Image (tube, grey):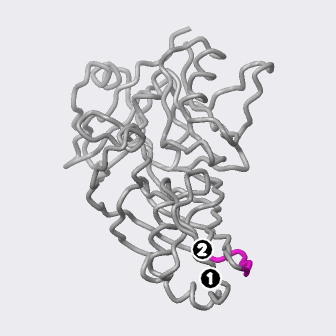
Amino acid sequence: MVAGWLNLNKPLGITSHTCVNWVRRVYGIRQVGHAGTLDPEATGVLPLALGPATRLLAFLRGPKAYRATFRWGQRSRTDDASGEITHLQPCPQLTLEEFMAVIPAFVGTVWQRPPDYSAIRHQGKRLYDLARAGVPIAVAPRPVQIEQIEVLAWRGGDFPEVDLSITCGSGTYIRALARDMGEQLGCGGLMSALVRTASQGFTLAASIRLAPDAPPPSLLPLAWPFQDRPRIGLDPEQAQRWLWGQRLGIPALADRDQVTVWDPENRFLGLGKVVNSVLQPLRVIQPETE
């Protein structure tokens, strides 16, 4: 059975869906999902779940990290450099110190309006499809969490650029951050480059590149993204009841919002939570049989 995780380094110029289709062909499996879309113009970490791992995607947690380049004095329809430029306002007077002064307003809980060209659905249709059809949709801002913004480099000129390291929560649009920072600076802004360096435990350093003619890469185990969660081992009777979806009363267990569950043969049986010494299933995974 094909089951596990693939830490893919998405190349420039292809969609996340194209990566999913490639993995489906290579591994001969239909059940493939990803942990957060990357735009075609972005590269970097794209965690992919294969087989039963797709049932665990909702339980991934942890921040995402990016290296991004923002360009000031320009606006586009897509909030990045790939879209039609709608505004040019040279701002050679803009300084790094002025930019640094606006950063605090964009750290913490930030209300962010998703880009018009995004994969969010409105009445069953993707926003980018509606935008291409010329249908204006006013998407309400939503709260996102931005943990850290660090300046890596600054380049002056008519259209200054800044390289940033950004750590944030799921659902954050980095190109929307560029747009909103540009508005705060009064000159407009867009994202000109983006690399995702980490996502919910998966890192760029450990990622693999697409290699269509190479053998399929080995997959990470189903339990790999959850190795920092507390581990609960069950005896044979408890393991069977767990596989039937039953709750298990286990005295002295501390309350936990997420634990990994294992059988006596050290096989991963899924994720649970503990409330008042009762182990409750979140996702039950049937162990592989020889």
Q: What residue did someone put label 2 on?
A: 72
In the rendered image, residue 232, in percent from the top left (x then y), is placed at 40, 39
* Residue sitting at the far top: 290
Work out whether mark 1 precedes mark 2 in sequence or the reverse, and give the earlier one.
2
Real-space CA distance between mark 1 and mark 2, rounded to the nearest whole angstrom = 7 Å
Badge 1 element: loop
* Depicted 34 relative to depicted 111: above or below: above
Q: Do the residues bearing badges 1 and 2 touch, measured as CB atoms within 8 Å?
A: yes
Of residues 182 and 203, the one drawn nearer to the viewer in this rendering = 182
Residue at 58% of width from left, 70% of height from top?
Answer: 88
Q: Amino acid at mark 2?
A: Trp
Q: Which mark is residue 91?
A: 1
Q: Amino acid at mark 1?
A: Cys
Q: Tell whether position 153 is magenta.
A: yes
* Depicted 152 relative to depicted 216: above or below: below
Of residues 6 and 274, the one drawn nearer to the viewer in this rendering = 6
Residue interval drawn in magenta: 150-157
Crowding at mark 1 (Cα within 10 Å: few <14, some 14-19, many 20+): some
Quarter of the figure that contains the N terminus: top right
In the rendered image, residue 164, in percent from the top left (x then y), is placed at 63, 70
Give the overall secondary structure of the magenta segment. Answer: strand
Residue at 80% of width from left, 19% of height from top?
Answer: 213
* Residue sitting at the far right: 213
Q: Which mark is residue 76?
A: none
Residue at 51% of width from left, 10% of height from top?
Answer: 289
Residue at 30% of width from left, 43% of height from top?
Answer: 273
